[in-house]
Amino acid sequence: MTLSPDLLAILVCPACKGDLVYSEAAQTLTCDRCRLRYRIVDDIPVMLVEEAQKF
């Protein structure tokens, strides 16, 4: 299932407040500025910096 466009419009990176790039296939939200990738679990974004994956 995809995230709602309304939700995607308001989500920002919790670390830098920058824009996020949504990947439906990978089920992630990516912040290129911080180089962090946030997982989406059961259609819920896990927006915790401590849980984010560095890339």
Image (cartoon, rainbow, N blue to C red):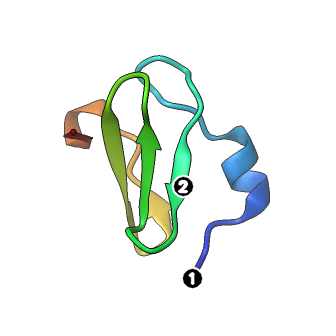
In the image, residue 1 sits, relative to residue 22, either above or below, namely below
Q: Residue at x 74, y 45 (%)?
A: 9
- Identity, as a three-letter code, of the amino acid under mark 2: Tyr
Describe the element under mark 2 as helix, strand or loop.
strand
Q: Which mark is residue 33?
A: none
Check the picture and name the quadrant holding the N terminus.
Answer: bottom right
| For residue 34, side relative to residue 10 (left or right) | left
Of all residues shown, which one is farthest toward the right?
6
In the image, residue 53 sits, relative to residue 22, either above or below, namely above
- Give yes or no for contact between labels 2 and 1 (Cβ–Cβ under 8 Å): no
- Residue 10 in the image, given as x and y percentages of width and height: 71, 40
Sequence-wise first label, 2 or 1: 1
Of all residues shown, which one is farthest toward the bottom?
1
Identify the residue position indicated by label 1 in the image.
Answer: 1
Judge depth for marks 2 and 1 and give the one in front. Answer: 2
Q: Residues within 10 Å of mark 2 (few under 14, many from 20)?
A: some
Quarter holding residue 12: top right
Q: Which mark is residue 22?
A: 2
Describe the element under mark 1 as helix, strand or loop.
loop
Mark pair 2, 1: CA separation: 13 Å
Q: Residue at x 42, y 67 (%)?
A: 27
Check the picture and name the quadrant holding the C terminus.
Answer: top left
Q: Residue at x 49, y 30 (%)?
A: 13
- Identity, as a three-letter code, of the amino acid under mark 1: Met
Q: Residue at x 33, y 44 (%)?
A: 37
| For residue 51, side relative to residue 36 (left or right) | left
- Residue 46 in the image, given as x and y percentages of width and height: 38, 51
Quarter holding residue 6: bottom right
